Amino acid sequence: GAVVSQHPSWVICKSGTSVKIECRSLDFQATTMFWYRQFPKQSLMLMATSNEGSKATYEQGVEKDKFLINHASLTLSTLTVTSAHPEDSSFYICSARDRTGGDGPQYFGPGTRLLVL
Amino acid sequence: EDQVTQSPEALRLQEGESSSLNCSYTVSGLRGLFWYRQDPGKGPEFLFTLYSAGEEKEKERLKATLTKKESFLHITAPKPEDSATYLCAVQGGGSEKLVFGKGMKLTVNP
């Protein structure tokens, strides 16, 4: 149980294009989903928190117009990197918390590696 | 501000050599302390949640304990497949967010 998937796992794109990453909770409903970014040999950096049906809450320093987050249902959240540039290359990981879990853990997806050329 | 400090940053063990990883934390109103395992190029895998001082949880060779200031992840007779980065995180009162430590890279040599 508590499986979170991400798609795609790998994406390479040209500078200036937009990339969409999907995050799905497969066997539970998630009121809240989270998007993280991880640089090599560093810990996770929270980018934003999204709640189903409402606007995402972005962390300080994260450009909301560049990283568009949509949490359309209790099992799906998407992150769109708009007008991607090489400095956006990174490992993006989503997580979800079971809506019935109270203060339960966040379950993480396998991550999406983005390379912008 | 909630903070998590993990030590050591890296640890090398021989197979079968037991040890403990430390996670010190300061948080306003602990709602949960979480341990995760992360393999290279993958997302973190959930291991344990601890909610109150004195609580202990076990899974195979791993045992997590919690006091009011720190948590320990004890690894008994580790195997090479236990090699990974172990992350500690806390959730404080009034927040949905997790505050992560920098992680501890464990290498178990055969």
Image (cartoon, coloured by chain):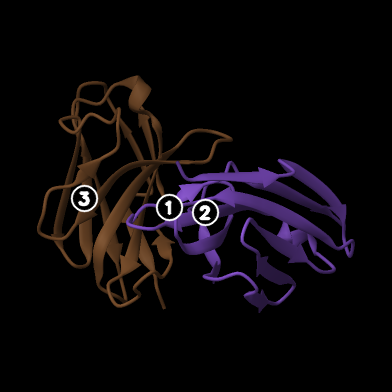
Quarter placement of the N terminus of chain B? top left
Query: Along the horizontal axis of the image, is B20 left or right of B93?
Result: right
Q: Earlier in the sequence, mark 1 or mark 2?
A: 2
Q: Which residue is mark 3?
A: A78
- Which chain does the residue under circle 2 lie in? B
In terms of image quadrants, where is residue B62?
bottom right
Q: Residues within 10 Å of mark 2 (few under 14, many from 20)?
A: many
**In-front residue for pair B102/A103:** A103
- Identify by letter the chain in brown: A
Q: Is label 2 or label 3 in front?
A: 2
Separation of disc 1 and disc 3 at Cα?
Answer: 20 Å
Separation of disc 1 and disc 2 at Cα?
Answer: 6 Å
- Identify by letter the chain in purple: B
Numbered disc 1: secondary structure? loop
Q: Badges 2 and 3: C-beta atoms under 8 Å apart?
A: no
Please, what is the three-letter code of the amino acid marked with disc 2?
Ala
In the displayed structure, B92 sits above or below B54; it is above
In terms of image quadrants, where is residue A80?
top left
Q: Which residue is mark 2?
A: B89
Q: Residue at x 62, y 75 (%)?
A: B55
The x and y percentages for residue A56 are 18, 47
**Is residue B39 visible in the rendered structure shown here?**
no
- Which chain does the residue under circle 3 lie in? A
The x and y percentages for residue B80 are 78, 59
- Residues at marks 1 and 2 on the same chain: yes
Q: Badges 1 and 2: C-beta atoms under 8 Å apart?
A: yes
The x and y percentages for residue B39 are 59, 52
Numbered disc 3: secondary structure? strand
Residue B98 has which mark? 1
Q: Residue at x 77, y 65 (%)?
A: B75
